[in-house]
Amino acid sequence: MNLTRAAIRNSQFVVILLLIAIILSVRSFLTMPRSEDPQLTLPIYNVIAVYPGTDPEDIETFIVDPIEEAIEEIDDIDRIETFIFDGVVRISIEAAYDIDSEEKFDEIVREVNTIKPNLPEGIVRFDVEQIKPEDRVNFLIIAVTGDGINYAELERVGEELEKRVEVVDGVKKADVEAYPEQEVQISLDYERMSAVNVSLNQVIGILQSNNANVPGGEVSAGGKTFSIKSTGAYENLQELRSTIVSARDNQVVYLSDIAEVYVRPEDQRWRARFNQQKSIYVSLKLSRGYNIIEVDKKVREVITAYQDELPASITLNTAFEQAPAVQGRINDFFINLLQGIVLVGVVILLVLGWRAAIIIITLIPVCIMLSLAIMNGSGFGLQQISIASLVLALGLLVDNGIVVIENINRFISSGFSKQEASVKGPSEVGQAIVSSTVTTLLSFFPLTQLGGGPGLFLMSLPLTVILTLVISLILALSFSPIMANWVMSRHKGKSSWSDRAFRWLAEDAYAPVLRGALRWRWLVALAAIVLTVFSIRLFPSIGVSFFPTADKPVLLIDVEAPKGSSLEYTDAVVRDIETILDTMSYVKNYSANAGNGNPQMYYNRFPFSSQKNRGQLLLNFDSWDQELFYRNIGELRRIFQSYPDAEVTMEELKNGAPVNAPIEIRIIGSDLDSLKRLAGSVEKILTATPDVINIVNPLERNSIQLNFQLDKDKAGLLNVSQLDFDRTVRASLNGLIILKFNFIND
């Protein structure tokens, strides 16, 4: 082939060029990003609103309907799903995958912001977010625990740790979570307010007016311009207490006369523990394109140094870490690479001799390093999918080199010179190995056209295999002949013991079998068909799954108490589970959460937020032992199968695009009673189906509501509007957020 002739003719230039590429590839490998999973940017967006004390019907009317109407005006939206719970709503938006996801996110934010001023007061959280692993998945979660330490002190320690780790290069963001925020609470005395004729709306209006911070502008005098500073907002609690809320009949009423004003933690919506100790979390996210192993090492140094400064009563515990899993996968790959090199070398040594073995063994790491460099330049890092693709390619990339070297060796044995054999050998088989390589590439090409979430997740697999095989083909037709010309011996017509052994296999063993198969060809064809049919029938026995399990020594346990359950009730259920976990020797440690999901630690398992009837536990096991892992899951499922106080479900982590469940049945209609009845029937059918687990029916239990009926006629006579009534009820039960300010606590 022309490529082979040109390579041998310019062998020194080719080798120098290849050495430069290898050096650059090694440098690229040392700096290329490493993570556990592909870092994807999906066109999936969430709108989350937390409105405590509000039932799902009111949330649908006052929050969901306006947001959905705004979103429906946006083009290229494929699906909108809304999940409403007591006090919480999550609207999931999925756009088309062939658009610019960043631009679509900006468009969604603009549309949602247009209706945001029309949403009701009292929403404590309102977020619009895009599904980005680097913005959501934490590569390290630190649990700050302390015996007898209050939340204020744990928060102080967590925020100091947050400041220290955020300056580490590669840490995109650190968050302190699972602690109640400090807030100024105004506890109104409605009897005093009635006595001095002060209404709730009057208090709210005065406080909001006094907290306004309007620039005063500027004034010119004597040739100079002066900026006018306005009165400004509240600066401390004393100013707030001294606010005049009413002045009539020579009587001045201060806020302190009708209310108590103090600083205290907000109503707790998230209780967290680590190994049964009260805890808060400091969760860290990795910047895109960074080596998780190096970043983790630097963060660990910061954490260790800070732990030495803390009192013995406060401990910084590792609740979750991702770096060891990434390091383990990389180590496994290099072990597989070394095993492949040794096995291929041994086979080539036995068949073609040590000189040919040296050439093939050299081709394997060179091909892998060049592939890694091009992968890095294309935006792909080392993660579980690209590593798996390299292991897959490892068994394919040696084929071309073996065919070329074997044919060169045959020409040398026939009496040709090394240079003639190095040209004739690849030329004779060149078309055949190009055709076989293209055939293999075409078998992987359809995976590049998969599309959607699974397609983006798997994209690095076919591209890496295709790239590696193309490089192996080029090296087999260029670098292999050069090395053969330099390394192969000049023997002519010598018959080695391996030649005699393979001649015996071909003539005495294989030839009779081949002649028999040709003589009884119809019987052989029938046997092949029967074997194929029998193999296909085995599929149900081995199971079918598009994505495999993650094989991580980690387990998430989800807890759902009956609707309307208090945080205390859910927390009690979670504590029951903790006592059982303490008896399991395979469990290394665990984090328990009530009212909120654990900080996200896997790319396709999204935590819930602010749901008092739900809890979640994160279990870390000592190591990955498949038998022990599934034995413990089976034991936990058996224990909680008929748990009377809540639904307890668990499932191993799985790869692939995020889905709610492997099987999801939706019943659509407008009559809620009919939907509940049909959902119950479907649940019974699924329960009776073998091997079906983790059945969740959100309509299984009804929530209990207390309804206040306002006598509008009497209210009108008393000059009380419906808004005043509803606002007073909410202020009495859940409180109202009426203003925000920074103050000096006194």
Image (cartoon, grey):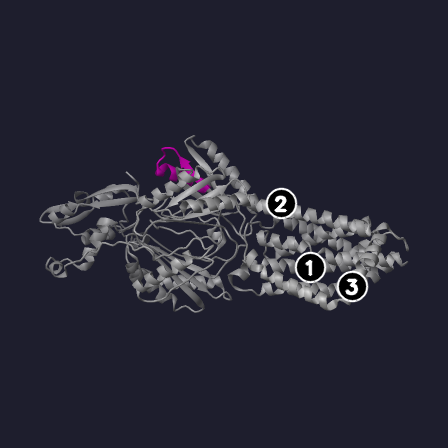
Indicate the amino acid at tag 3: Gly
Residue 268 seen by the camera: no
Indicate the amino acid at tag 2: Asn
Q: Is residue 392 above or below residue 279?
A: below
Q: Could you classify mark 3 by the number of other residues whose Cα lies within 10 Å: few (under 14), some (14-19), or many (20 or more)? A: few
Left or right of 496 on screen, residue 256: left
Quadrant location of residue 386?
A: bottom right
Between 261 and 224, the one lying in front of the other is 261
Q: Could you classify mark 2 by the number of other residues whose Cα lies within 10 Å: few (under 14), some (14-19), or many (20 or more)? A: few
Instruction: Name the residue carrying label 2.
Output: 331
Q: Is residue 613 above or below residue 59?
A: above
Q: Position of residue 697 (x, y in %)?
A: 37, 57
Q: Position of residue 483 (x, y in %)?
A: 80, 53
Residue at 60 percent across and 58 percent down: it is 461
**Magenta region, residue range:** 142-163
Secondary structure type for disc 2:
helix
Between 546 and 167, the one lying in front of the other is 546
Instruction: Name the residue carrying label 3.
Output: 516
Say which mark, if any, is on residue 469. Answer: 1
Indicate the amino acid at tag 1: Leu
Disc on the earlier residue, 1 or 2: 2
Label 3 – label 2 distance at C-alpha: 48 Å
